[in-house]
Image: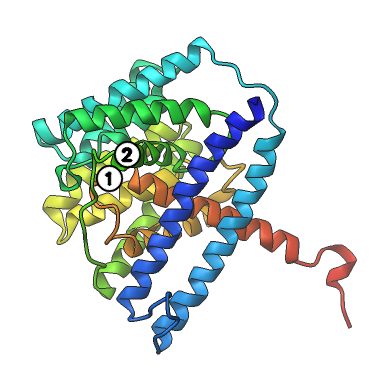
Amino acid sequence: MNRAIHAVGAGALAAAGAGMVVASIAGSATAVGWDPATVTGSGAGSFVVALVGALAATAFGYAVLAEARQALRIEGFELTRTDLGNAAAVAVAAPVTYATSVRVGVGPVVAAALVGLCAAFLTETYDAPAYCGSFVGMATPAAGADLGSVAAAGIAAAVVFVLAKRVFNGFGGKLGTTAFVGCLSVAALGGLAPGTGTVPEPTAAAGLVVAAAVAALATFAVSVRLGYGPVVGSAVVGLVAGLACPPLLAGGDAVAAVAFCASFAGMAAPARIPGPGAMLLAGGTAGVAFVGATPYFVGFGGKLGTIAFAACLATAGVLSLGRLLAPTGSDAVTG
């Protein structure tokens, strides 16, 4: 039974990540005129989307299966006082962030970043769950969100946070995916409904991918190299992007969103995404997925984190498959 609890938590996060992979591929395919359902379309764009999508899905699946095997080996599930505190932090941060975003009017990126920074400076014990709750609070009226539905989603996310406490640790975007599952749970009961969007034009899309790669690396630098930790690293990048990009750049809201999204990838532990090169890949992958998923789940809290989560898993899968397939030792010597 205890193993089953861990499996439920892992399954919920993996399913959310898989859904975002599908959404990203579908959005990218539609943008280039390729229909994955009928396998129709022509041109280099369709070929690239099909190839990259297949690689990403394979790598993502490989990483998920590896983590699932670990989850099934975990013995014992015990509900502790820390778990109750974590759940409370998630549940409280969600409506606080929503009120800051919508009622105060600073917007979801700045609101979540502020809540994350405040949590990090006030308590090292509960900064991560509070940051998770802030992602629930990023839900917007575009998805029909109000204070009640966000509070309900925060409670659902709090439950998922506890269930998944020992799985997928160290992967960037786990907190956001937990928030996304909470929002999906409320949506299943009719409390939220996603808005719609359109995939950016190629030039804008390329800029977003570059911004994502830079933001992930910047977060990694603040978190790991400077030693401030993942919550502060991500929140600082999000706050700077949220305050600076909208007034200074055309399409600045999208740039701020993709930078914040990639900052969640930058929260990954070095054991999961080792070094700057791998982090650039994870950030760029998050940017590509962000562009592809633009039409879907608009206004849902946790969407950005789920994109980063899928990107980190895909990157980890690529690295693992590369090590598995690459020849080593004497096998590398031929001729």
139 lies left or right of 56: left
Of mark 2 and mark 1, the one earlier in the sequence is: 2
Residue 300 is marked as 1
> Image point 40% across, 32% down: which residue?
231
> Image point 25% across, 41% down: which residue?
190
Q: Secondary structure at mark 2?
A: helix
Neighbourhood count class around disc 2 (C-alpha, 10 Å): few under 14, some 14–19, many 20 upward: many
Residue 56 can be seen in this image: yes
User: Could you say which quadrant of the image residue 170 lies in?
Assistant: top right
Neighbourhood count class around disc 1 (C-alpha, 10 Å): few under 14, some 14–19, many 20 upward: many
Residue 324 location (% of width, % of height): 74, 60
> Image point 56% across, 48% down: which residue?
273
Relative to 169, say whether 281 is above or below. Answer: below
Residue where numbered disc 2 is placed:
183
> In the rendered image, which quarter contains the N terminus?
top right
Q: Secondary structure at mark 1?
A: loop
Residue 75 location (% of width, % of height): 70, 25
29 lies left or right of 313: left
Residue 253 location (% of width, % of height): 19, 53
Judging depth in this view, the residue of 147 and 193 nearest the camera is 193
Residue 238 location (% of width, % of height): 29, 42
Q: Amino acid at mark 1?
A: Phe
> Image point 13% across, 35% down: which residue?
102
333 lies left or right of 42: right
Give yes or no for contact between labels 2 and 1 (Cβ–Cβ under 8 Å).
yes
